[in-house]
Structures are given as C-alpha cells and as structure tokens.
Image: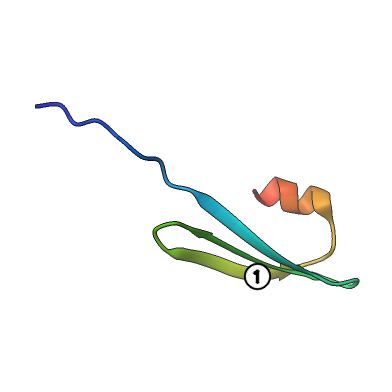
Amino acid sequence: MKTQQTASAKLFFGIDIHKRGWKVHCSTDLFACKSFSMPPDALQLRTFV
C-alpha cells in the first residue's frame, strides 16, 4: 500500500523590529522552533531563512 502526502508543513516567522536589533521567532504549524535576537540586517536574516 502506498501512502501519499496530502499536506505540507507551513513555516511562520514573527519579527519584533527595533532600531538596534531584531527579535525573531520561527515556528511551524506543528510546533515552536526557535527564538533569537540578531542585528538589524535583512541580508543576515535572509541567509538564516
């Protein structure tokens, strides 16, 4: 019997933006993953994602 995936997991990001730093929280629709702080750099965030 073959099984077939009917739904894919979704990834969510929440970003608290401040002048000196960003607080980022990522999670899926199944569980919370990670929270961290980083400098306000969009390229660095893109590299992480």
| Residue sitting at x 31%, y 36% | 6
Q: Is residue 33 left or right of residue 49?
A: left
The spot of residue 45 in percent (x, y) is: 74, 53
The residue wearing badge 1 is 36
Residue 17 sits above or below residue 42 on the image: below
Q: Is residue 40 left or right of residue 13?
A: right
Q: Residues within 10 Å of mark 1 (few under 14, many from 20)?
A: few
The spot of residue 49 in percent (x, y) is: 64, 48
Quadrant position of residue 23: bottom right
Q: Is residue 25 left or right of residue 10?
A: right
The spot of residue 32 in percent (x, y) is: 47, 66
Look at the image and tell me in which quarter the N terminus lies. top left
**Which amino acid, mark 1?**
Phe
Total numbered circles: 1
Q: In the displayed image of the protein, which residue is found farthest to the front?
A: 6
The spot of residue 9 in percent (x, y) is: 42, 46
Please tell me which residue lies in front, 31 or 7.
Answer: 7
Residue 20 sits above or below residue 31 on the image: below
| Residue sitting at x 48%, y 48% | 10
Quadrant position of residue 39: bottom right
Please tell me which residue lies in front, 3 or 21.
Answer: 3
> Disc 1 on helix, strand or loop?
strand
Q: In the displayed image of the protein, which residue is found farthest to the top?
A: 2
Q: In the displayed image of the protein, which residue is found farthest to the right?
A: 19
Q: How is the image coloured?
A: rainbow
